[in-house]
Structures are given as structure tokens and as C-alpha cells.
Amino acid sequence: LFTASGATAWTDYQHFPWTIGWQPNYQTEAHVYARYILANKPDAKIAILYQNDDFGKDYIKGLRDVLGDKADKMIVAQVSYEANDPTVDSQVVTLQASGADVWMNGGTPKYGAQAIRKAYDIGWHPLHFVVSVASSTATVLQPAGLERAKGVITAAYQRDAADPRWQNDAAMQQWSAWMAKYNPQADRGDYYNIYGYNLGFVLTQVLRQCGDELTRENVMRQATNLDMTAPLLLPGIRIKTTPTDFRPIKQMQLQRFDGQRWVLFGEVIEGS
């Protein structure tokens, strides 16, 4: 229930009727990047770093879904890495040599950080998208070096505790008090502390909707009939599921790292 993965397998209600995802799936996230690229840099030459598994291939498919018949012309390089590779340094050098001016860095946290660092060190500064699973300031950008990460873009769907715009936000203040009471040693800059809080809120709603009928069938019935928000989602983003739509979150907003924190820009973008 609400698997902590954006793999599209967890949205496949026909083959996995007892499993539902939570976050925007990787293809949906890639749709958001592709729509931004088409609107703002339609002549882009795109390079892709991806993990050689379903995780990485979901991002490629998502980009191609939106780019359509322009994909083969716009994507000038795609280079993979294995999940047990020591580094992705050579892959980044190869992508730079392609002449790409847009880069989708599809690394998981370890490799995302390595790729950010290597690109900076070799002087490659394309329009740089880093996937959301590797966007944590505490676990990715700080290890990479905050200065090296300046200017990278990612897609978000929940509030960032480090963003001063939420300083007086009632929901963020409630989360802060909750953290002080139940999780005081945690790093509040860690993306996953807000992630877990939002997810827990939705799980609680599912249980409320179940009433006294706590059967497997009714839990899934309620989990696939949601139309709500959660306290720390970004404004304008809703959770909607149906018996044939196991994708709770399908909207995201882009944000750019300014060297110290993520700064939201633009409008909420709908992924399909």
C-alpha cells in the first residue's frame, strides 16, 4: 500500500491489483520535464544518464511519450550505468562529448551526486534536470557540493522545509512541532521526513474511510477512491485515484537550486 517507488509497475492495476504506488511515477515525472523543454527550449539537444533497469527506462519512455516524433532528433545521447558501478564519471564525460545542451541526470542519490560533481568539475553546464529521487539537499546536493549543484532543476510535489516561503505556513508549523516531539534527531532538510508525513496522512484517511470494515478488499477499495490533498503537498496538487488509476499524484512543479535551497518557479504541470 503506497509503495515508496515511482516504478510504473506499481500503477499497473490489471497485473498488480493489490499494490498501489504513492509518488508521481517516473514516466509522469519525465512528462513534466519534456513539456517544459518543448515549451522553453524546443531546439534542445538532450542527453540522458539512466540506470540500466526499469527505473531508468521509465524516464526514457516518459520523455519519448511527450517528445513524440521529435524524440529521435532531440535526444542526441543516452548512456546507462549499472546499479553496482563504482562511479558514473566516464558516462558524464561521454554525454558532454555529445554536444547536448540539455541533460536529464537520471541517477539515484549516489550516482546523481557523483554526476553533478563530475559535470561541474569538467566544466559542463547544460540545462540540467536531476530526477526527484536524487533531489534531497541533505543526501545528494551537499555530498555533491552545493556550489556544484547551483542551477540544477528538479520536479517537486511537496513543500520543502528549507524554503522560507513556508516559514509561516500553518501546515509546516504543525509538521515542525510533530518533528520536535517524535523525531527530534532527524535532519529536517531530508526530503523523506516530509514524504513520510504526507504519506502517513493519506494512509490515515484510507483507514478512516474503511470504517469498521478492515478487510483487504475494502482497504484497496478506499485507497483507489481518493480525492484529497495532504498537508505538505504543494498548493494546487491533489491526490486522486480510481479503481483503474493507481497513480495518486500526477502533478508536479519545477524548482531550481540557487546554491543554498530549492526555489519553485512556473506553474504546476500535469503529467499524464
Image (cartoon, helix red, strand yellow):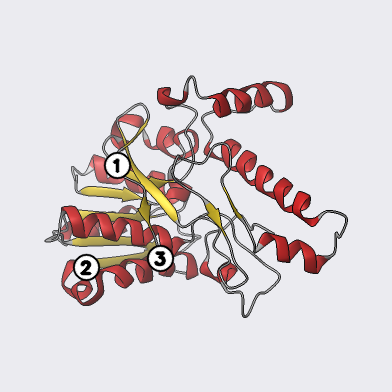
Residue at left 22%, top 68%? 75
The answer to which of marks 3 and 1 sits earlier in the sequence is 1
Kindly check if marks 3 and 2 are in contact, taking CB atoms under 8 A apart as contact.
no
Q: Amino acid at mark 1?
A: Val
As drawn, 228 above or below 73: above
The residue beneath circle 3 is 272
The residue nearer to you, when weighing 143 against 25, is: 25
Q: Position of residue 206 (x, y in %)?
A: 72, 53
The answer to which of marks 3 and 2 sits earlier in the sequence is 2
Q: Position of residue 123 (x, y in %)?
A: 18, 42
Residue farthest to the bottom, as pictured: 14
The residue beneath circle 2 is 75
Q: Secondary structure at mark 3?
A: loop
Residue at left 21%, top 61%? 46
The answer to which of marks 2 and 1 sits earlier in the sequence is 2
The residue beneath circle 1 is 152
Q: Position of residue 268 (x, y in %)?
A: 36, 47
Residue at left 25%, top 74%? 68
Alpha carbons under labels 3 and 2: distance apart: 21 Å
The residue nearer to you, when weighing 82 against 30, is: 30
Alpha carbons under labels 3 and 1: distance apart: 24 Å
- Dot 2, crowdedness within 10 Å: few (<14), some or many (≥20)? many
